[in-house]
Image: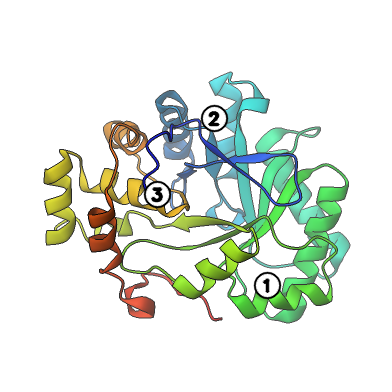
Amino acid sequence: MATPKLSVASTFPLPNSPHRIPRLGFGVYQYPPPTCVSSCLKAFRAGYRHIDTAQYYANEPSVGRAIHESRIPRSELFIASKILYPGKDIEATYNMIKESVVKLDGESGYVDLFLIHSANGGKESRRLMWLALEKAREEGRVRDIGVSNYGIKHIEEMKGYASVWPPAVNQIELHPWCQQREIVAYCIQNSIVIEAYYPLVRNQKAHDKTLLGMAEKHRKTPNQILIRYCLQKGWVPLPNSDTPARIASNADVYGFDLGVDDMGKLDALDRGRAGALVQAVHN
């Protein structure tokens, strides 16, 4: 479990792709435009190079502005977005994806990763969005494509219509209280990168005795323990914060290591589906 050589620049390979994904990302859910721009810029200064947004968040233009204002070469950044629902057909859905790309990286730009945001829309909705994502990938507007909130049955279902399989990524809720072990094992078996949203549990477990004890032991914040836990599980955590000190602190998780005993204590906090803040997937 120990991964002492990790750094903020560490990456994972993506399946069936020449590209790699940073092992730490910065989420921008519920960030209004001005906050989104300033928070992304602070994240870049703290060393993050991976930003995770979505059409549903309504802040893609703000992420695009931060990319431009950062003056960091685009090739050094990894930008991800998500589509929640399809248009009337594949072409209309593709155009929705293309609009996001333009908002994020301009007319001639690209997005590194585009996900289907949810499996909840039904099989035809999932099919339309995936085929549109495949078209965007073929045309170079998107480099890699994946899913979010997908259970095993949804990923297996894709074999009936997908030319690109497996999906590069499955982004799901993951933290010590919601470990979703069945879908995690499936993704590992199929070389699907696992992204963890809500790794900080919306700060709802900040006073948990196990977490506080571990933070005191390592002289780290509870957030740093939770992010380090995700990294050592082999997940890509996507913490978010609009506080400059916390943005920097959440990226400062490489000078210590959680031992086997530490990881075991955090693993023991799992409450299964009952531990989810948003939703556990349906397998």
| Residue hosting label 3 | 232
| Residue hosting label 2 | 66
Q: Amino acid at mark 3?
A: Gln
Q: Callout 3: helix, strand or loop?
A: helix
* Residue 164 in picture, x, y percent from top left: 81, 60
| Residue hosting label 1 | 155
Query: Which label lies toward us, 1 or 2?
Result: 1
Query: Which label lies toward us, 3 or 1?
Result: 3
Graded by Cα atoms within 10 Å as few (under 14), some (14 to 19) or many (20 or more), the crowding at tag 2 reads many
* Residue 62 in picture, x, y percent from top left: 55, 37
* Residue 184 in picture, x, y percent from top left: 51, 66
Residue for point 65% across, 64% down? 190
Q: Is disc 1 in contact with disc 2, using a CB cutoff of under 8 Å?
A: no
Q: Is disc 2 in contact with disc 3, using a CB cutoff of under 8 Å?
A: no
* Residue 252 in picture, x, y percent from top left: 32, 33
Residue for point 82% across, 70% down? 88
